[in-house]
Image (cartoon, rainbow, N blue to C red):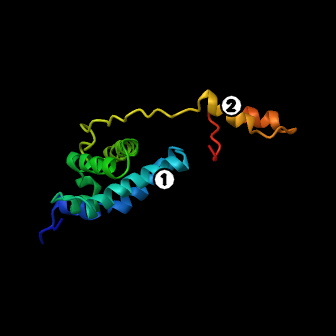
Amino acid sequence: MRCPSSTSTVCAKASKRPTAPGFLKDWNRTLRVANHLEATRFNYLLAADQLGKYLGEESSDRDAEDAAQDPTEVTKAHCESFQVWMIETRSASTALNKHKAFQQFFKFLLDEEEIDRSPMARVKQLQTPQKLVPIMGDDDTKKLLDNTNRTFMGPRDEARHRQPSYRPESV
């Protein structure tokens, strides 16, 4: 934003506004104060950073470059196009995680009175297809158990193989 040579309240406020990295630093501090887990903070900050990079490097929206530098300029259309890009380049579940992080980021900007309305306010939450995980059939389980080492540790190994969450690398 370029300010005219005369001083105005809007330009004075805009010149004090942090850049995208400044907002992320402030948001990280707020997340730490709220005692969010480090992994949560990392994923939230990563999502916001990825949105900025997408807007600056991938988006064809004419005002995306400004939004890449200043998150208060992000629109609903920017968020939706990012989510489409995420679905196309990653997965729907990854896009859903980004969606949830954006909700938190723009809530932070609202709380800080940097924006009047969240661009995520009317962005619909993605539907993610439910993936069925194949399980081993009885024949495969029998083959695996028949090949289990029958030593002192054999019963332990057999119990591990019977656990639904256990997936040996060789199967």
Determine the image quadrant of residue 11: bottom left
The answer to whether residue 51 is above or below residue 108 is: below
Q: Separation of disc 2 and disc 1 at Cα? A: 43 Å
Residue 157 visible? The answer is yes
Determine the image quadrant of residue 149: top right
The spot of residue 86 in percent (x, y) is 33, 50
Please name the residue shown 43% across and 58% down the image. Answer: 25
Side of 161 where 70 appears, left or right: left
What is the three-letter code of the residue carrying label 2? Lys
Identity of the residue furthest to the right in this view? 152
The one nearer the camera, 55 or 127, is 127
Please name the residue that numbered disc 2 is placed on: 142
What is the three-letter code of the residue carrying label 1? Phe
Please name the residue shown 54% across and 50% down the image. Answer: 38
| Quarter of the rendering occupied by the N terminus | bottom left
Please name the residue that numbered disc 1 is placed on: 42
The spot of residue 66 in percent (x, y) is 22, 61
